[in-house]
Structure formats: C-alpha cells, structure tokens
Amino acid sequence: MAGGDRKLHIVMFPWLAFGHMIPYLDLAKFIAQKGHKISFVSTPRNIQRLPKLPPNLSPFIHFVELPLPRVDCHLPENAEATLDVPSDHIPYLKKAFDGLETGLAGFLQASSPDWIIYDFAPHWLPPIATKLGISRAFFLIFNAWFAAFFGPASALIDCSDDTPMEPEQFTVPPKWVQFPTNVAFRLYESKRILASATNNASGVSDLYRYGSAVLGCDVFAIRYCTEFEPQWLTLLQDLQSKPVIPLGLMPPTVVDDSGVNETWLSISERLNNQNKGSVVYLALGSEVMPSQEEVTELAFGLELSGVPFFWALRKPPGWNKSESVELPDGFEERTRSRGVVWKSWAPQLKILGHESVGGFLTHCGWSSVIEGLQFGKPLIMLPFMVDQGLNARVLHEKKVGIEIPRDEEDGSFTRNSVADSIRLVMVDNNEGLIYRKKARKMSALFGDKVLHDQYMHNFVEYLSKNSRCVHEG
C-alpha cells in the first residue's frame, strides 16, 4: 500500500493549558476527518472539560487519560490545567507534568503509533519516541515571529547559568533578524519573560523545554501562513535545521446553537440593543488575571471613553478569594445603560461575530487575535505575557489596531490611556478609520477557511508520506 493511502495512528500530547489543548484538538479533528486514528493524551479532568466530539469523529479520536502525579503541595486538589492555578504556581504544574513521562512512555510502547505530535513542555519526550521508532512532530500554537525571535533551538539548549540573560537584550530585535521591524519586548515584558523562561520551581527552564522540543523533532509545525508576514516564516526555516510546515491560521468555526443556548440568548439580547459597530468587546483570555489596580484603571477607562461595552470578566477557577478583584464602587450602576460586565463564561466567537461589536480590547493571545481579525474587528491591545507583546508590535505595525500605552519600567497603564485608545479605534474618523478599514480587509485572509484547511491538508499529506513506517516499509 502506498504511504499516502495507509491510515496512520497519531498521538497528540499538548501542554496542560486550554489555549494549547483546543488547537491540538482542532488539528486532531481535521486529521481524523481523513480517516486516521488519533490518541489524544491528557489528564482525566482536562479531557472531561474538552468540547464534545462530533458523532462522526468519535470512532477516530480516542482520549487517553494519564493521572497527573501529586508531586508538590503547592498544587490545589484537582488542579490539572493552568487555569486551575495562579500564574506563579505554573512551575509546580510543569513539575507534575514531567511526572507523566513513565505513563506516556508505557502507552507509546504498547500502542506503537506512527507519529506523536507534541508541545513545548515535554523535554524528555523526543528521546523516548526516537528509541521506540516513532516519528516526531513539534506543534507550536504561537506564530513565526515569536518562534524566530529566540533564535536556533541549539542556542537555547546551550544557555547556562554561567551566562545569564539580561532583560535589556530582548528590548531590541535580535541580530539574526535582517529586515526592518519593531518586534521586541518592552523592558517590563522582558523581566516577566525571563522570570519564567529561566530556571524555575519545575527544575527546567521554559527555554530549555522549547529548545529540546524543537531539536528532538522530525518536523516543526506552526500555526501560521505564508500570506501574512512571510519573512518571519522564512527566517524560522533558516534558523531551524529541519522542515518547518505552516498549518494555516486554523480559524475556528462558530457553532449555531442559538435556539438552545440560554447564555447566548441573554447576551445577544443586550447586544441587539446597541447600534451597529458601536460596542467594544473586552476580554483578556481565560488565564490572565489583572491586578486590582489594572481592573480599576480598565473600568474607569471604559467609563471615561463613553463607548458602549461588553466586558467578559471571569475569575479563573484556580484563583482563591484573597486574590479576587473588585470593580470600582458604583461602576456597574453608572454604566448600566451602555455597558455589560459578564462574570461567567462568554461565547467569544459569537460576540465577535455580532454586528454591534466594532472593536476588540484583547490581551493579544494568538488565538484571540485570529478570532478578532477573522471577523474584521480592529484591536485595542493590552498584552500581558509570553508572545502577546510581540503580537501587539506586529499588529500595530500592520495598522489593524493600537496598543494601550504602558509605563516602560513597570508596565502600568492609566484610565486615560485606556479611554483614549478605545475612542481612537472605535469613533475617531481620521487615524481610527484606518484601523477599522484595515481590520475589515484583514478578515478576508484570517477568515479564509478554505485556504487554511488546505494548509492542514498538506500537513496530513506530509505525515502520511514521511512516517518512519513508510520509509522502513
């Protein structure tokens, strides 16, 4: 049987964050549509919280539960994902994640898959898969400029405590970027990045994890496309000594359940009362928990802007009561006629697709950026962590949105900067009109499902033709 016709068995092993697990599951569904068998490996509680599979895919996708070892008293009971713990406890979650090594190795040995598609965290995985003769694909859910910014994987592995990195070195584009760009971290972002990227309570730095994942793979897959800022993809291919395959932007599909979803019925009723394009939607992702000062400044900024708003403000489940934040006294009453503060889960895709929503105040996570731009919504950007600052620099450069100004040293921002940024993007008819027009134009690319599905189809073809079993057969 030809390599392209044989049905594969592929294991998927994402990091324990829903911002990672959902793109991995989306890729798994696409591969399963081609008739290949998927074993999706995670912990029991995470698997229970994933979206239900369509009936036609259930025979092809099997969930494999590996219990998360209890290795540290810092993790709350039943904490199995990043949203279950405060951000400063995530290193302990990584330590527990490393305890999955034995269970995963046993499953791989027993099941003999053709491929394993894995995330940045399991630095110990590539040698295991290599020994078992399993082909290895590293799937990065971030984009090409983030991956290229940190240079070749070998350099990350070679980083040692003897040559500590300084925050200032990340505030300028790296030397291997030979084209003009403003892609660099702010000083306050660099300090936050280095705090987690270097050695932490897990015993292994994020940079070492990422470098090991890349060095140990046969192919590097990334959520990106050549139609948007292609120079970064070319640079990434030059930096890494292995194939780099874009998977497209993987724009999600809105599920039409308006007839039965009480949450959406309530939200849409409120949005229907606003004028077309008048509402700013504010959502900072499921794992960003702003400080009390940041919530206060955001609230007063919304109030000062005078713009109708829908604020999805939900406390992540892993944060305890002592870490909760409060809205300013009287804020909801004063803004009730034009604003909604929604304190439970909100269907982001449906909100962004509603005609009354004219802008998106976002933390600038790559998935949220894709969702906002697939609906042509200009961005008001307030990045907090990991790739988000670099995303904001690129998108500001492309004029599809603006970044809320922050203090360069400590990252603080003011209510006036929030209000001014919202008004500029939402109502200004000079510079703001440019952002709105460019974002609408960008929706043709970011929302092109046919284009991006073709990228994933090409990736599946690559897996079929390049598994070790094909070559050895």
Image (tube, grey):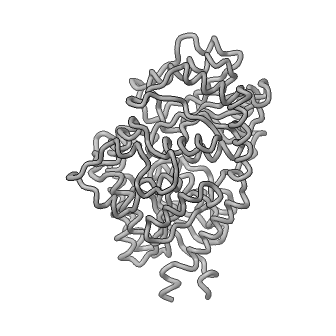
Residue appearing at x 54%, y 61% in the figure: 233
Q: Nearer the viewer, residue 473 or 67?
A: 473
Residue extending furthest toward the left: 162
Q: Nearer the viewer, residue 290 or 18?
A: 290
Visible in this render: residue 358?
Answer: yes
| In this picture, residue 397 sits left or right of residue 191 | right
Q: Is residue 54 above or below residue 434?
A: below
Q: How many marks?
A: 0
Residue appearing at x 57%, y 54% in the figure: 23
Visible in this render: residue 141?
Answer: no
Q: Is residue 261 above or below residue 470?
A: above
Residue appearing at x 60%, y 55% in the figure: 229
| In this picture, residue 301 sits left or right of residue 384 | right
In the picture, which quadrant includes the N terminus?
Answer: bottom right
- Image position, residue 374 (x, y; %): 69, 47
Q: Quadrant of residue 318?
A: top left
Q: Nearer the viewer, residue 397 or 469?
A: 397
- Image position, residue 311 (x, y; %): 61, 27
Residue appearing at x 33%, y 61% in the figure: 155
| In this picture, residue 245 sits left or right of residue 270 | left
